[in-house]
Structures are given as structure tokens and as C-alpha cells.
Amino acid sequence: MTERYLGVIGVAEALGVTRHAVHKWRTRYPGDSRHPFPEPDVEVDGSPGWRAERLREIVRWRESLPGRGAGGGRPSLARQDYLRQAAARGLDRDEAIRALAAFTEEFPEMTEPELCAWLVEKWRR
């Protein structure tokens, strides 16, 4: 029987991010860091793989990442305002966070609070 695993692309799709983000997390948060990315269950020709049932663990890991510039797990005031405005426009929390992650990758020169403030300002116009 063939065993199935999620690769970097599968994890990225499940989280609504790019595969680059998953690679970046694995590099930025190695096993000896304060917040290590979950180790893969298997590696085939240098490519990592995680059992599908570990996706919840990976999601919890991501949700516990401190926000950029927030200094901890509590959302910054800018992020809280962004999430309120996104909800007012019909986005659920996960959709809003995925959208914010996409903007964060698209505009790496901006901090998350700057992006949140910029998006809220755009919506208010």
C-alpha cells in the first residue's frame, strides 16, 4: 500500500500561502530555534513530507507565530483594525489572514502594521 504525504506544495496550498513561504519558515525556524517548524516525517531525494494528519499541528504552529512588529502572539492594533474591516466586507478570519499573508509576500519592504493600515485606508476611501 502506498503511503501519502504532504510536500511543501501541499502544505502551502492547505495554508493558503506560497511554497516559498513554507521553505522560508523551514529555514527561519529550524529545529534548534525557539519556535521550530514541525520536522517532516519523511524525506525523499531531499524533499520533505508530512503525514496528512499533522496538518493541524502545522496550522497551530503557524497560528502561534508572533506577528511582525507585534512582539508576541497578540495581534497589533493595526492587525485588529484590519481584521475588523475585513469582516465588515464579508471576509472570514482565515480569508483575511491569507490575503494579508499574500500582501506581506508581495510587499516585503512593508511591515505587517504598515500593510494593515494601508489596506484599511484603501477600504475607507
Image (cartoon, rainbow, N blue to C red):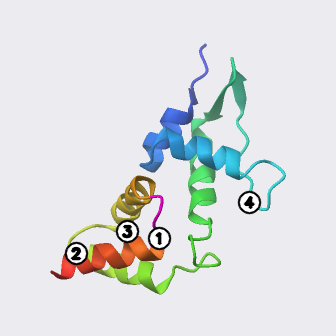
Say left or right for 124 vs 37.
left
- Quarter containing the N terminus: top right
Residue at the spot 74% in from the left edge and 53% down from the top edge: 36
Location of residue 95 in the rendering, given as x and y in whole percent from the top left corner: 34, 60
Q: Which mark is residue 16?
A: none
Q: Does the segment drawn in magenta span residue 100?
A: no
Q: Amino acid at mark 1?
A: Glu
Q: Which mark is residue 93?
A: 3
Depth-wise, is mark 4 or mark 1 nearer the camera? 1
Mark 3: secondary structure: helix
Residue at the spot 49% in from the left edge and 70% down from the top edge: 111
Residues at circles 4 and 3 in contact by the CB criterion of under 8 Å: no
Location of residue 71 in the rendering, given as x and y in whole percent from the top left corner: 64, 78
Residues at circles 4 and 1 in contact by the CB criterion of under 8 Å: no
Furthest-front residue in view? 109
- Quarter containing the C terminus: bottom left
Magenta stretch bounds = 108-112
Residue placed under numbered mark 4 in the picture: 35
Q: Which mark is residue 122?
A: 2
Q: Residues within 10 Å of mark 2 (few under 14, many from 20)?
A: few
Residue placed under numbered mark 1 in the picture: 112
Q: Earlier in the sequence, mark 4 or mark 1?
A: 4
Residues at circles 2 and 3 in contact by the CB criterion of under 8 Å: no
Q: CA distance from mark 4 to mark 1?
A: 19 Å
